[in-house]
């Protein structure tokens, strides 16, 4: 399993643990899942954070 998938799973689990129950919990879980997905994409090297911030390493 790639780092992207692991971070997505971890984000979803943390969201469920932090906010259990109701629609608000559902939205918080989705938010944590998206955060986990973003962290996983950065860890896999599929998203270049330095390039997004204007500090690209290759010139």
Image (cartoon, rainbow, N blue to C red):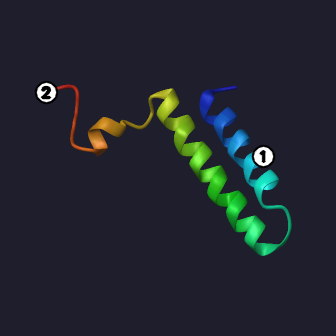
Picture residue at 54% right of the left edge, 39% below the top: 39
Residue 55 in the image: state x and y as whole percent.
22, 36
* In the image, residue 6 above or below residue 38: above
| Residue to which mark 1 is pinned | 13
Image height of 38 relative to 15, above or below: above
Q: Is residue 58 above or below residue 24?
A: above
The mark found on residue 59 in the picture is 2
Give the percent coordinates (x, y) of residue 27.
Answer: 69, 67
Farthest-out residue, front: 18
Q: Label 2: state its secondary structure.
A: loop
Which quarter of the rendering shows the N terminus? top right
Q: Is residue 47 left or right of residue 25?
A: left
In terms of depth relative to the viewer, which is nearer, 25 or 52?
25
Question: Looking at the image, which residue is at 19% across and 25% down?
Answer: 58
Q: Position of residue 44 (x, y in %)?
A: 51, 28
Tell me if mark 2 has few (under 14), some (14-19) or many (20+) residues whose alpha carbon lies within 10 angstroms of its own: few
Q: Residue at x 56, y 36 (%)?
A: 40
Q: Earlier in the sequence, mark 1 or mark 2?
A: 1
SS of the residue at dot 1?
helix
Q: What residue is shown at x 45% (from left), y 28% (from top)?
A: 45
Q: Nearer the viewer, mark 1 or mark 2?
A: 1
Residue 4: quarter of image? top right
Q: How many marks?
A: 2
Say if 16 sits above or below 39 in the image: below
Q: Are marks 1 and 2 in contact (CB under 8 Å)?
A: no
Query: Between marks 1 and 2, how big is the CA–CA gap?
Result: 40 Å
Of residues 18 and 37, the one drawn nearer to the viewer in this rendering = 18
- In-image side of 28 versus 57 (left or right): right
């Amino acid at each position: 399993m790639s780092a992207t998938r692991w971070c997505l799973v971890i984000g979803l689990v943390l969201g469920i643990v932090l906010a259990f129950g109701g629609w608000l919990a559902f939205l918080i879980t989705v938010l944590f899942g998206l955060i986990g997905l973003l962290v996983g994409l950065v860890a896999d090297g599929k998203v270049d954070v330095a390039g997004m911030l204007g500090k690209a390493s290759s010139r």
